[in-house]
Image (cartoon, rainbow, N blue to C red):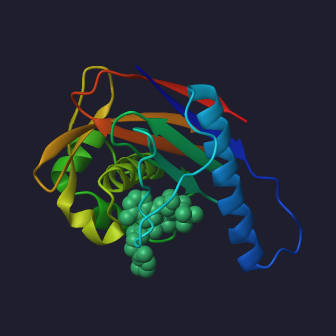
Amino acid sequence: MTVHALLLPIVQVEDQSPGDRMGAQRAAAREALRRCALIGGAPEHGWCQDKRSAPLPLEGFHWSISHKRRLAAAVIAKVSVGIDVEEVKPRRNRMLFDEVGSEREWNLLGERSWPGFFELWTAKEATLKANGVGIGKLAECCVVKRGRDGRLVTEYAGEGLWRVERIEHNGHVAAIALPHDSVCDVEWHVG
Ligand SMILES: CC(C)(COP(=O)(O)OP(=O)(O)OC[C@H]1O[C@@H](n2cnc3c(N)ncnc32)[C@H](O)[C@@H]1OP(=O)(O)O)[C@@H](O)C(=O)NCCC(=O)NCCS
């Protein structure tokens, strides 16, 4: 089974209000979802969310979106799935390294660095989204190992393992979390 994921660059508009900018981001993520559906043979429209904004499966297809200022992303799969995209940009607060990752996790990731931080962060956020929960549950998600293929493996709420697929694109990193035992290849598309 192939899981399709699509990254869609967002064209920047001068002097946009924060509200308009967020509206454009959200629209871009939905356009990415529509294009992804066309590629993967899923319904083009009809994707709905529950009261907490978690995506509801449609005709057996699970989906997830993420949107940042310059990049939107979407993924559709026949199994539970979550996606997160972040711009890899150093922050002032290096304490974030320890807030997001334990000593054990940093030993798996390597030296504390901003690329490492965003790899860890997107892996965890994609896992949370695949479980239909938000950042409030961050403490229940951890990275348990890095596979021989280089992929991170996460665990949520001590219940199950997730494998993380990632791609770097134009100063961003995107991560997808899929059930660890699912047999599927991820195909990334841009635009
Ligand atoms: C879900 C969450 C982790 C997303 O993080 P983010 O980096 O800000 O945003 P992203 O662009 O990566 O993802 C946003 C998308 O996640 C999806 N999403 C929202 N809640 C979700 C959930 N519970 N499960 C799965 N996906 C969810 C939505 O599709 C949303 O896009 P939309 O608002 O345009 O529909 C975060 O919004 C969160 O923790 N939400 C729940 C708690 C909350 O609402 N807190 C707000 C104040 S603390």
| Viewer-proximal residue among 5 and 146 | 5
In the image: residue 4, left or right of residue 110: right
x 88%, y 75%: residue: 15
Q: Position of residue 133 (x, y in %)?
A: 32, 63
**Outermost residue, left direction?**
158
Q: Is residue 149 above or below residue 122?
A: above
Quarter holding the N terminus is top left
Q: Say which residue appears at 79% left-offset and 79% top-offset.
A: 17
Farthest-out residue, right: 14
Residue 182 lies, with reference to residue 50, above or below; the image says above
The reply to whether residue 145 is visible in this rendering is yes
Q: Nearer the viewer, residue 4 or 122?
A: 4
Task: Judge whether 80 appears above or below 156 on screen.
Answer: above
Residue at the (21%, 65%) spot, across then down = 139
Placement of the C terminus among the 4 image quadrants: top right
Instruction: For residue 70, say whether it is visible.
Output: no
Number of numbered discs visible in the structure rendering:
0
Q: Residue 110 at what x, y percent from top left?
A: 30, 41
Give residue 117's position: percent from left, percent from top. 40, 52
Horizontal side of residue 143 vs 133, given as left or right: left
Residue 138 position within the rendered picture, expressed as x and y whole percent measured from the top left: 27, 64
Q: Image point 33% across, 30% down: which residue?
A: 151
Quadrant housing residue 152: top left
State the image quarter where residue 145 is shown. Answer: top left
